[in-house]
């Protein structure tokens, strides 16, 4: 058995620090274990001994009899290391440290926390926490938390950084009848982290969807690896707090979690196949649908309703989400006519007017879902005096159980639909109070279907890169100058070693050298001033383009150098005309190298037309990254424009990705501009800037 | 008294077609009038006579004694005209026609419907409906509907096209304790429409916010006029179904309402000061805040919480919405420290950790809200075992009642917070189950504050337009060619009459004329082929730019004409270099002339960088319209670029707006490109296309 499973299926649970005082949280844990139905032995441990809820209290973990595989530790923080040591000696498989007072309180706590990890490792125990509320498995059942409600047995696994969010979520689930398979509150993630959280759920047959709430991701690459392996098997829905500057500050003051930049996180989720949500509501809405419904084969939706307004709102939202109203065949409409009230709008939305009989919902749903040109359905109901709400819920459920296509339910109301809400959710029909939310849930099902079916995005190595040369150049620069920007020629050398297409260039210290280099490059050429201390060359007349003759070379050279002996001039072959784009890379603290691609020139600032990816990346991914941007769309050939050399841009992206992946010492790399010529004319890295912050390793 | 007020405050209500059968809707109306507390006389009317719920049933409206001011009509559709006639004769002030079976059933119903309008007019009655559920005034109280729940007396007025949405909304309101002032279901809007709906609510002192659900807007300009007059006094929150193609189809099949284009609708709301929402949930969320909270003076928010996660989610959403976390002064933090638990994060978010005492919520809120650098607050609570939820709700309410600054409440949960939800809403603290929703509600308060305080956008007439000349040219064209596109020269003449800056041009039928015109224009010039049947001139070499000499004029002329006698060539002064933009106008069926402005060239299609406004428009509005676009941002001078002549672009927009406003016969107008030169160099309408579809009127 995978060791992580001992968290959810242990033979015997010890609660160390259990109190007999009913207002204490540790009493609550014993109570929940007992009352929420755990069938294995429950061992409260407390030096005081005695009895809690009829269970003998052992005075130390060493006295607890077999079998005992899991310990829930709730003692005062400074005592936790000693207790964990004893657990290890007793042969406990896994521990959950509920106690707070570690990293979140400052450096001393952080130090104490690290010692826990060492103890766990020494005894081959896995540890959840500290500063968490524990776990639930609703199917076993097992509830090691002190949370009031354990949800119904269902199919959503919830992995949460925060214990409070677990409490809030189970409280919500209770009110609407949504079921969960497993819940794990990870707390400070000293040992078991979000990546482990994903792996804990992947083989659980009761889990159909993995829903994650995260504040920080201590090891971003590990998360990407775990999610990448799991997402085609089970959808992963993730909500992350701290994606904006303000949110990061809020998270940081909360648990000291490294929140990370939003851009890198989004790029990581794209690579890892994770469905991103922005709010708890959206997270629950989507998880409910993925937990209980099949996946649609296409984007064609039917709306069955007793009110036009909510259907129109749903139609608007479906349209925004890229879904569409199915066209119902004449045959389907004829069959619908037989099972719906007189006057029913037989087109789509199918509007059964104010007061259809409840059984018309199942009948109409069954008719439309048997139409091969329908992929999914939404049943909409507004309560009124005529149709019993409970019966409508039953008939929607019946239709859902008789089809292989997804159905969601929307009832616009509150007081009258409370029981119907629970009935639908408990019976696996995701319920939404708002048509727009129901529409987004259907869109989410399709989004996951497309994600699951997308091509493999595993990065493949880029051929023909000269890593040794790049290393040599970087190493020499490091030795000479240490951290900082490489000069232009050196940066170009590094890029060229990785097969990035750099216009021919050389540096001239006098006018004769300039003429010689111009001869080699062939006119037209560009000339760029290299002068210590001048960063923005353009501002001081240090860039001259499209120079056509030896005469011009002479003139320009003398103007640029202007008598300064320490100045040199770069002579560069001119790139062809083409789309000016910008290609950048930087190291993200959590996710490693991150690539950026977008429109260059003045547009980059105004349009913010940029796409991000983790580096390195495969060809499919690079192509999609480019296609996401307006620059990519223009290069694809808009309004009869000649298409750009997208293949060359893809290759450049891949080569830059490989370079920054191979050399983490490169903290920043910019090609600005990269000129993408017409198809077949290549992509020209006209200006390459590289910064290094550490010694290059190979 | 404004006649519309008889709908909400009538002396005596007759229910014509009232049934004594408790399953009938008309019985429900009598029941609601009685049981929901209407204090005036209630008169059921039915030829059968008898008694309903202890009320005498009159056999006709003519028999009903005084006072009776409002009639609710629920008879079979074909009988409605006769009944309305009788109401008129009886001196009824206003009627509500609940009966359906009119426009929504086809042309015959539409015909019948129009007759109702005539009868109402003849007797000076106002009419709501047909095909509606009636009205409520919770303060009087009055409930003429058969809907189950009448909401608590509150401050939201709800105007709904759809009766079902009224039912769903009141059902929802009942479950969460949200109060309303008035509710009106307008149905087919034959007489009283959305514009009247706004006016009905504007003087009601119990109404603090007007919330509208619309499917179609029969008279868009009337709506804009009403909303423009009211929005600074009371916020208007509007949800409109049928903004996408799919949604329009859904609405059309529902009530036959003209749904209109989303673009025109958004432009109309911008002009009218209407807050746009996209879903029922968002509508309720925002209306709840506006109904009960004051407006913030700035964008600085404090979060008071007992859990870090939801606060971080709120912070992320606030950031997205342009709000920020207030910086709490050292003094405020010191005062907070005294009233919060040990270990509380005193920065913002103020995290009181897991189990603060309930009274710490009021104490902490009072401290932060007395800080002058705080504009509003959100209280966040996740239920746990320690703090009683009800007491937290009471303390949040207490703080809200003791401050002039807005407060919203967010509790993450469900089962445990049901009563707290109702308590908070009933006491005027808007409650949200999700931190993101609470954040957006605060953002909505600020958005309304800014809207209320914005400059006047009333269009002002544009000076120096030669309407007579424009009319003469259009008239001549209409007489000659009828509907269709004007030729280039004619279009330029019309534009020039309105002071739109057109490069000098003339049409040459032979090379001598061409040379003469070139002399007048001054080199460089542009030459454009005018040939019958050639629409896309560029595709056939029919456009030549930057012609510098007489020699080139000769050559180009002969190439373009190529021996065809029916061809002419336009000789045009070249515009200066500048930003290429596109400026367009079209007539919207509902809202009249609509202006578009955005980036020109290949970018218009890829970037969809366009802004829309109703025409005509004032200078402030035109300037803002331009500023919304990327083209506008570039022209404002990005990264040291020379700023463009925005004043000239503003003027061109205004002149085009005036032109299409003055001449509704112009169905389409495009200036593509408009070249906006550097500041002071003007905006040049290089190519003007105008289409007319009817005879010009003056």
Image (cartoon, coloured by chain):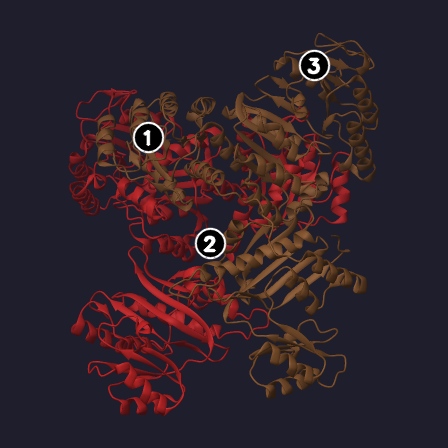
Chain colours: A brown, B red
Crowd around label 3: few <14 · some 14–19 · many ≥20 (10 Å): many
Q: Which residue is mark 2?
A: B232
Percent position (x, y) of residue B524?
Answer: 41, 86
- On what subunit does the disc labeled 2 rest? B
Q: Which circle marks residue A369 in the picture? A: 1
Q: Position of residue A417 (x, y in %)?
A: 42, 26
- Dot 3 corresponds to which residue? A12
Q: Is A650 on the left-hand or right-hand side of B338?
A: left
Disc 2/disc 1 C-alpha distance (Å): 49 Å
Is A258 above or below relative to A387?
A: below
Compared to residue A462, the image places residue B408 above or below, namely above
Is B450 left or right of A194, judged from the image as shown? left
State yes or no: discs 3 and 1 in contact (Cβ < 8 Å): no
Nearer-N-terminus badge (3/1): 3
Q: Position of residue A558 (x, y in %)?
A: 68, 86
Comparing A570 with B197, the one in front is A570
């Amino acid at each position: 058995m995978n060791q992580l499973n001992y968290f959810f299926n242990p033979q015997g649970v010890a609660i160390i620090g259990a109190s007999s005082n009913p207002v204490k949280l540790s009493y609550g844990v014993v109570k929940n274990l007992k009352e929420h139905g755990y069938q294995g032995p429950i061992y409260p441990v407390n030096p005081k001994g005695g009895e809690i809820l009829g269970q003998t209290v052992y005075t130390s973990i060493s006295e607890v009899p077999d079998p005992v595989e899991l310990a829930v530790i709730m003692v005062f923080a400074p005592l936790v290391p000693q207790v964990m040591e004893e657990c290890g000696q007793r042969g406990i498989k896994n521990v959950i440290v509920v106690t707070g007072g570690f990293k979140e309180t400052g450096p001393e706590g952080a130090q104490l926390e690290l010692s826990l990890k060492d103890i766990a490792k020494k005894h081959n125990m896995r540890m959840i926490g500290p500063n968490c509320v524990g776990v639930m498995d609703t199917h076993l059942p097992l509830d090691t938390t002190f949370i009031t409600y354990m949800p119904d047995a269902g199919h959503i696994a919830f992995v949460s950084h925060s214990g409070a969010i677990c409490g809030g979520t189970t409280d919500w689930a209770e009110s609407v009848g949504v079921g969960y398979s497993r819940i794990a509150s990870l707390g400070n993630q000293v040992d078991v982290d979000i990546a482990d959280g994903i792996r804990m759920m992947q083989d659980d047959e009761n889990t159909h969807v993995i829903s994650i709430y995260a504040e920080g991701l201590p090891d971003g690459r590990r998360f990407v690896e775990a999610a990448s392996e799991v997402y085609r098997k089970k959808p992963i829905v993730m909500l992350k707090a701290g994606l904006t500057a303000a949110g990061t500050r809020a998270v940081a003051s909360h648990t000291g979690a490294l929140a990370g930049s939003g851009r890198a996180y989004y790029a990581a989720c794209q690579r890892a196949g994770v469905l991103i949500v922005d709010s708890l509501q959206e997270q629950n809405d989507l998880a409910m649908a993925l937990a209980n419904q099949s996946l649609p084969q296409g984007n064609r939706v039917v709306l069955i309703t007793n009110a036009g307004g909510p259907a129109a709102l749903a139609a608007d939202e479906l349209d925004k989400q890229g879904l569409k109203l199915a066209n119902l065949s004449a045959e389907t409409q004829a069959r619908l006519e037989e099972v719906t009230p007189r006057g029913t709008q037989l087109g789509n939305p199918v509007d059964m007017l104010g007061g259809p009989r409840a059984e018309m919902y199942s009948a109409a749903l069954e008719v439309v879902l048997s139409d091969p040109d329908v992929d999914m359905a939404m049943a909409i109901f507004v309560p009124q005096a005529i149709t019993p709400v409970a019966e409508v819920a039953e008939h929607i459920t019946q239709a859902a159980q008789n089809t292989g296509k997804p159905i969601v339910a929307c009832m616009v109301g509150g007081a009258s639909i409370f029981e119907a809400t629970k009935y639908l959710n408990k019976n696996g029909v995701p319920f939404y109070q708002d048509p727009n939310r129901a529409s987004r849930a259907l869109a989410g099902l399709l989004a996951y279907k497309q994600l699951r079916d997308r091509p493999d995005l595993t990065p493949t190595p880029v051929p023909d890169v000269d890593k040794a040369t790049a290393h040599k150049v970087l190493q020499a620069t490091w030795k000479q100058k240490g951290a900082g920007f490489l000069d232009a020629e050196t940066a170009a050398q590094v890029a060229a070693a990785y097969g990035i297409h750099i216009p021919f260039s050389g540096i001239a210290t006098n006018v004769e050298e300039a003429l010689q280099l111009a001869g080699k490059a062939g006119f037209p050429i560009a000339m760029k001033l290299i002068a210590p201390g001048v960063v923005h060359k353009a501002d001081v007349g240090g860039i001259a383009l499209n120079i056509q003759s030896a005469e011009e070379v002479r003139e320009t050279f003398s103007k640029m150098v202007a008598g300064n002996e320490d100045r040199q001039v770069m002579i560069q072959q001119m790139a062809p005309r083409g789309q000016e784009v910008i290609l950048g890379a930087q190291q993200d603290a959590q996710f490693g190298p991150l690539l950026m691609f977008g429109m260059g020139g003045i547009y980059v600032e105004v349009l913010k037309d940029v796409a991000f990816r983790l580096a390195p990346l495969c060809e499919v991914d690079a192509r999609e990254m480019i296609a996401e941007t307006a620059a990519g769309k223009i290069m694809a050939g808009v309004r009869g424009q000649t298409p750009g050399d997208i293949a060359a841009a893809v290759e450049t992206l891949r080569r830059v990705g490989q370079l920054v992946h191979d050399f983490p010492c490169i903290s920043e790399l910019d090609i600005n501009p990269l000129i993408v010529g017409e198809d077949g004319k290549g992509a020209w890295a006209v200006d390459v800037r590289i910064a290094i912050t550490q010694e290059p390793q190979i």
